[in-house]
Amino acid sequence: MDILTLEFFQRALIGGVLIGITAPLMGLFLVLRRLSMIGDTLSHVSIAGVALGFLIGVYPVAVGLVFAIAATFAIEKLRKAYKTYAELSIAIIMSGGVALASLLFSLGKGFNVSVTGYLFGSIYTLDTIDLLLIGIVTVVVLLAIGLHAKELFLLTFDEDAAAVSGLPTRYFNFMISILTALVISVSIKIVGALLVSALLTIPAACSLVIARSFRQSIVTVVAVAELAVVAGLMTAGLWNLAPGGTVVMLLIVILLVLLSFRRKFSAG
């Protein structure tokens, strides 16, 4: 286990463990509200911001974060405009994000190799600034969920009842969207924009298989994500594999195992 003594791998583990807390937590709220595709949308928009950051010489993750937050406001606006077809807003913003990213790629051909790291993840290149940003986002997410757990629970399972009871649903909808944008923006350097939605949704899918309450779901998503992240990074480090892809494949394996066990218990 000499790899554990390497500084770059230690930073990778710290960043992975922190994202293993925040990404599945936000993903749980998205999945339960049937908004899981928002993860894909915001990650694609973030890549457009990353590309612009490289083009103008500004910290790419910061620009990606600004783009992701702007996209959340746009999604909410379009959701209000297309109330009957709320998912249309997600498709429109995703298309715009992909189109803008492709245009920026064509303008900055010299940085395409660097951007590729954000598409597929480059967790071994995390630096002190990256870890600081990930740490701040983790604290913000945990504080927000801890302070508003009851409100978020009601909003997640019955938004109409939450509105009737006087809960400022618009405020909490924006809060969930912005927190999701924060998590995705700092996650793309770890697992990559093309894989980040897996870290948001697959742990939540696992919780739907075995959890019997909302509290159990919270514990399950974090436990599954941390298991996949730590085991995935160790496996990738020892066998020289792509870390982001290894983590996601382990998540899928865990989900398949849980589903197979449920079928056996149901059959029994």
Image (spheres, helix red, strand yellow):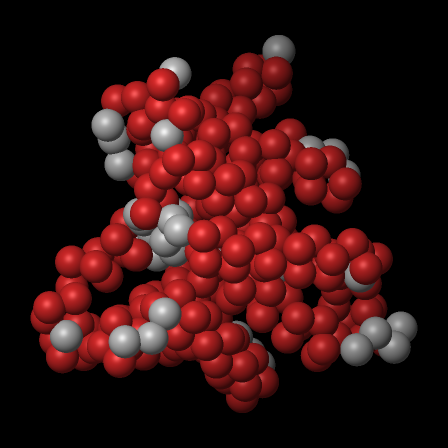
Residue 157 visible from this viewpoint = no
Q: Quadrant of the C terminus?
A: top right
Tell me which residue sits at (64%, 30%) in the image.
210
Tell me which residue sits at (64%, 34%) in the image.
220
Q: Is residue 117 above or below residue 268?
A: below
Q: Is residue 65 above or below residue 266?
A: below
Residue 13 drawn at (x, y percent): 46, 36
Find residue 21 and report its image quarter.
top right
Viewer-nearest residue: 36 or 15: 15
Residue 39 drawn at (x, y percent): 46, 60
Tell me which residue sits at (71%, 71%) in the image.
172
User: Is 266 situated left or right of 45 in this image?
Assistant: right
Tell me which residue sits at (32%, 27%) in the image.
237
Residue 19 visible from this viewpoint = yes
User: Is 88 situated left or right of 24 in this image?
Assistant: left
User: Is 44 situated left or right of 105 in this image?
Assistant: right
Q: Is residue 36 above or below residue 55?
A: above
Find residue 61 and report its image quarter.
bottom left
